[in-house]
Amino acid sequence: MAAALTLYRSSIGKKAIMAVSGLIGIGFLVVHMYGNLKIFLGPEYFNEYAAGLRELGGPIFGHTHLLWIARVVLLGAVGAHLWAAYTLTRQDFGGRPRANRYGQKKSIATTYAARTMRWGGVILLLFIIFHLLHFTLGVVGYGPGEFQRESGGQFFAYQNVINGFRVWPATIFYIVAMLALGMHLYHGFWSAFQTLGINSYKTNAALRGLALLIAAGLTVGFVAVPFAVLFGIVQ
């Protein structure tokens, strides 16, 4: 128990928590993007998909039970990721090396994505809050009566997405956040395997390539929907 607590408090333990929670988040994003892209199949199919999410795991799980379990796991992963990032950032600033004898400071990060992990993380945190208020609760980004809630077993997820992305400020913020997500994922994915000791010199290039593929794929997949709405492809 003492050893586990020591690991939990150490930089290595916090980085491991950040890596595992990040991989859980990536898994959710892949599933979420897959669901979002179903909007191209039409309103009936997309609304049926939204309704089906509430019956996941039936009859073992009740109405929305498994969905809420998934949400709790995701929120736990996000909370652990944020906590680890915050504590590691404090450690980093507290122990940051001073300038060398030539008056130069060493770069802490080696890539642009790594150097922007912190502000990218802040943008994503703000986006998560906005996203919940926007598409889940419908309290921002909609005109009066534009957000329709479930009524009598009918779902209006398709029209809610259309109405939500017709608002330019909300859509621009969404796209910017997805670009930040792409950079965050690129660095975070391969560094997670590095932290967990899974990669090696031989696999590093392959993991970086996979990280780029996942980051680019998720970014394109997520921004495809707002662009499709803006250009009238989905309406």
Image (spheres, rainbow, N blue to C red):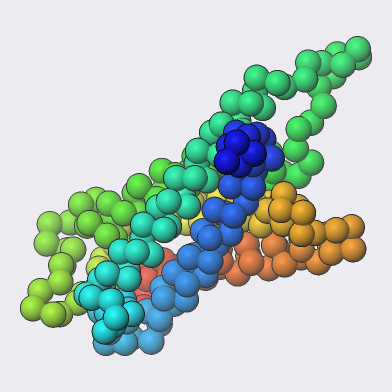
- 226 relative to 88 in the view: left or right: left
Give percent across and percent down for residue 88. 61, 33
- 84 relative to 76 in the view: left or right: right
Q: Residue at x 18, y 56 (%)?
A: 143
Q: How many dots with numbers?
A: 0
Give percent across and percent down for residue 70. 38, 64
Q: Quadrant of residue 110?
A: top right
Question: Residue at the front extreme?
Answer: 1
Q: Residue at x 54, y 33 (%)?
A: 86
- 137 relative to 193 in the view: left or right: left
Can residue 170 be seen in this snapshot? Answer: no
Q: Residue at x 64, y 47 (%)?
A: 16
- 45 relative to 122 in the view: left or right: left
Can residue 226 be seen in this snapshot? Answer: yes
Seen from the viewer's position, the closer of residues 190 and 199 is 199
Q: Quadrant of residue 214?
A: bottom right
Which quadrant is home to the C terminus? bottom left
Q: Residue at x 17, y 63 (%)?
A: 146
Position of residue 110 relative to residue 102, above or below, is: below
